[in-house]
Amino acid sequence: MFTRRNLLKLGLLTSGYTVLASGSGLRRVLANDDLPASPSLTPFIVPLPQPPAPPPVPPFLQPDCEAGGFIGTTTRFFRIVEEEAFVSLHPDLPATKVWRYRPIDAQGSRVEPWDFVLGPTFMVRVAANCGDGVVVRMRNELPANHVGFGVPDTTTHFHGGHHPAASDGFPDNVTGIGFTPVIKTGEEYDYIFPLLDPGFRDGAPDPTERPSTMWYHDHLFDFTGPNVVRGLAGFYLVFDQKDSGDENDPSPDALRLPSGEFDIPLVVQDRRVGADGQLIFDALDHDGFLGDTFLVNGAVQPFLDIQRRKYRFRLLNGSNARFYRIFLTGASGQTFPMTQIATEGGLLAAPIPGIQSLQIAPAERVEVVVDFRDFPNNTNLFFENRLEQDDGRKPGGVLSRGTGLLQLRVKGDSPAFDPSQVPSTLRPFAAISEAELASATFKEFKFDRSDGAWTINGQLADLENPLTTSIEGQGEIWHLDSGGGWAHPVHLHLEYMRVLRRNGNLPALNERDGMAKKDTVVIGADFGDVDIFVKFRDYPGPFVFHCHNIEHEDMRMMARMDIQ
């Protein structure tokens, strides 16, 4: 079978050829505009899918906190299967073949029913002690004889987490200690997530470094893009005593943000779908795959009935290359304000009220609270994307009108009872001190293109050898820069970034150190260069950083970093 690795060796990636999804040979590379268009589908007739949490199963590993294994008597255990299934994306389409995560019970039986493209939504709590974390046993039951795009070997990355290298979802099988193995059909692997605060190993855990909205997805070297398009993704939500997931929590520490049925995770993805319902993907379009049909939580432009009260929306860009600028709009195009409360780096230090839109790059997350009390019964509102993009390399301008991604149907003759709130302080933290900045190690990484592939500091991804090595506990300042007119959402594993400067200036409030933390920052094109601060803690071993335009990532814009 031809792979990106083979074609790189043969030099064919610069000759304008790629491989048909069916594997039938070589053909000219098609631009996104040359791919078959999806059929026109009626929007807002499908209810929003909301996958539930997986059921825990009895322990299947012995406690070994004393041995450094992070498993104790309070550890929660889950079992998940990766499977191929047929799911409806829209009533006017035949069922679509997808790959997905699905919960299974202790006996290995599927949890029924499961009519979702997305995997189960994990809901976990930050650990107070070793052994309070989570273990996920992942079993690969994808078809070994699969035909079409995607490769049925997997390694799952729990994106945004602080966990050991052996559970990070390292992209390839590499000889050494601490690597997550790639699992093949019929194999399984246990991912261990201690959920301890960064800095715990030195006795100085930092409770401000806590995630909020994480997600998990396949991370196979060369094939993350097609495997994620197939459907391998799901949400992983994290709570603690402040962000408790209970808007009625009487504790003085509790923020009482909208919770339960009023806390809505939303992953936005673009896809191309044939009239037969099957997904279309140009497996070696390395500029960045763009779809022409929009899914939210795995359904084409769904709707959600909402009450007249506050809601928390957790928006995740799960697309391969598309950026979004999302507005809350009415039917006439009028826009309404939202309050931002979090990024992919967890809760902000304080809310940012009155934002009229949010721009979100691949892998970024933005959380907003919207108050619907003043909208009359039967008002239809929309999360609308107004960002133009016809090129996988970067987004275009903001349009006056765009595409409705999700319809919000306001229900109720009078405002609903609402005990939730958005306090003026969320999760405050201090910006990195001048003293720590002065003692930080400086590193520079250039994201560029070379001979039809994507490089960092002039090098294609080499997972056998680290591009950079860091010392645990030593602060570092990274200068991230890009050549050409390409936009690169750069994702760093293991730790959050503090954005110090963008193009030499103070960053916008929603990514500024002292207000926000990030695990993905956009550089290049109109975004410019960025200086970040990062300090690696607790977990030695091999990790990676890479562009999260997944076609760039698969075409080698990735680097191994070792923590010592």
Image: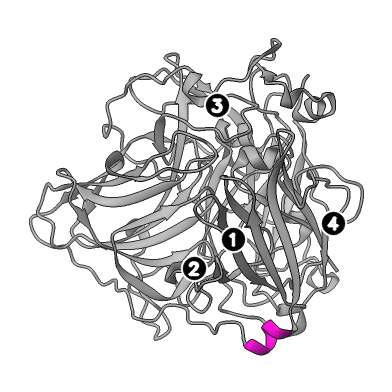
Q: Earlier in the sequence, mark 1 or mark 2?
A: 2
In three-dimensional space, the C-alpha distance between marks 3 and 2, rounded to whole angstroms, equals 39 Å
Q: Quadrant of residue 261?
A: bottom left
Q: Earlier in the sequence, mark 4 or mark 1?
A: 4
Q: Position of residue 264 (x, y in %)?
A: 37, 54
Comparing 298 with 54, the one in front is 298
Given the image, on which type of amino acid does mark 3 rest? Answer: Ala
Given the image, on which type of amino acid does mark 4 rest? Answer: Gly
In three-dimensional space, the C-alpha distance between marks 3 and 4, rounded to whole angstroms, equals 32 Å
Given the image, on which type of amino acid does mark 2 rest? Answer: Glu
Q: Secondary structure at mark 2?
A: helix
Left or right: residue 33 versus residue 58 is left
Determine which residue is flagged by label 2. 511
Q: Which residues are magenta?
A: 434-438
Circle on res. 529:
1
For residue 41, above or below residue 560? above
Q: Quadrant of the C terminus?
A: bottom right
Q: Quadrant of the N terminus?
A: top right
In three-dimensional space, the C-alpha distance between marks 3 and 1, rounded to whole angstroms, equals 42 Å
For residue 193, above or below residue 423? above
Determine which residue is flagged by label 4. 178
Q: Secondary structure at mark 3?
A: strand
Residue depth check, mark 1 versus mark 2: number of the one nearer the observer: 1
Residue 137 in view in this figure = no
Q: What's the residue at 68%, 20% (across, down)?
A: 18
Q: Are marks 3 and 4 in contact (CB under 8 Å)?
A: no
Circle on res. 375:
none
Determine which residue is flagged by label 3. 85
